[in-house]
Image: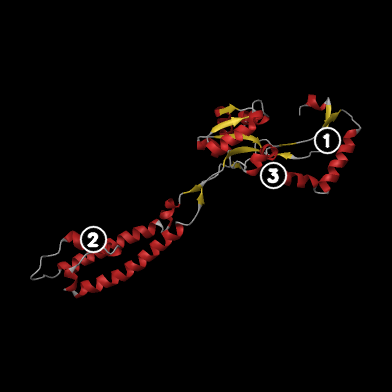
Amino acid sequence: PTYATYSKVDFTFPLLPAKVKWMCKARGPISSSLNFHEGIDVIIWLLLLASIIFVGLTFLLVIRSRKYPGMMQPDTLQIMMTPLGMLFAEFGEAVWIKKNTPGRVIFITWGVVGMMLMILVYGNIRSLSFKVEYEKPLDSTEDVVKSGSKIWIIPGSMQYASLSTSENQWHKKAAQLATFRHFKNLKNIVISIATEGKACYLIPEESYYGIINQDPMLKKNPPKVHFSKEEILPYVYTWIVQKNSQWREKINEHILLNDQAGLLEKGRSVLSSV
């Protein structure tokens, strides 16, 4: 309210706060197939690769240190790939190992270690495949702008004026990218955001719950949306009375009694019970 407004009318004590937030589509789950990289740390993967190379070189050194009469000399690549093949039980019949005692010792040792490593890796990946991860929600103006979503704002609203004159670069960016959507089409806007997810609308959170509670079909199956944690220029609801009205103090008294009795808080809970 401006000074001119206060000179003409009075306001009662506040009733309910209006939490003006970004309303965007609720974030959905991420495919569990993307969790495999969390099974083992990058350093462990590098150490595993280094171990395979080291064991392969050790095999090569041991096998090349002696001759094998009556049989073809084993291929260098075959020897080097043996440690990797053992991890997946795809190493074939390595006859040259049977005729080399040090080779058999290394073969058995690496087989046991490799089996334990594979059990660890497969077990972790298997457990992570059941882990449900959700997309990061859009909880600030910065998130909304960076997401590339369309930005919708109520025309002539205080929030648009606040964004356009803010010193916050993301607020200014949002104001520059904004297009206006009138409040009277709120039901269609909510459904569009929940189904298509291509835009975010800056409105009081209570307005969403109000439109849901007024429509039996929407209340039965409410559109899934997410409200940001950031609030843009929040305000409160109040009664406007004539200047110096005798009713102002009486209304204020009732507001205080209702607040002390917890009825205002109950009203907020009922309003948001979707």
Q: Earlier in the sequence, mark 2 or mark 1?
A: 1
Residue at figure coordinates x 20%, y 63% from the top left: 79
| Residue bearing mark 2 | 81
> At which x and y percent is residue 52?
28, 62
Residue at figure coordinates x 32%, y 71% from the top left: 112
The amino acid pointed to by label 1 is Thr
In the rendered image, the vertical position of residue 10 relative to residue 105, given as above or below: above
> At which x and y percent is residue 83?
26, 64
Q: Secondary structure at mark 2?
A: helix
Q: Earlier in the sequence, mark 2 or mark 3?
A: 2
Q: Taking 192 as reference, is 31 left or right?
A: left
User: Which residue is outermost to the front?
Assistant: 217
Q: Nearer the viewer, mark 2 or mark 3?
A: 3
Residue 248, can we see it? yes
| Residue bearing mark 3 | 272
Q: Taking 238 as reference, is 165 left or right?
A: left
Depth order, front residue of 239/177: 239
Residue at figure coordinates x 39%, y 56% from the top left: 42
Q: Secondary structure at mark 3?
A: loop
The amino acid pointed to by label 2 is Met
> At which x and y percent is residue 93?
20, 67
Q: Quadrant of residue 1?
A: top right
Q: Secondary structure at mark 1?
A: loop
Q: Earlier in the sequence, mark 1 or mark 3?
A: 1
| Cβ atoms at labels 1 and 3 below 8 Å apart | no
Quadrant containing the C terminus in the rendered view: top right
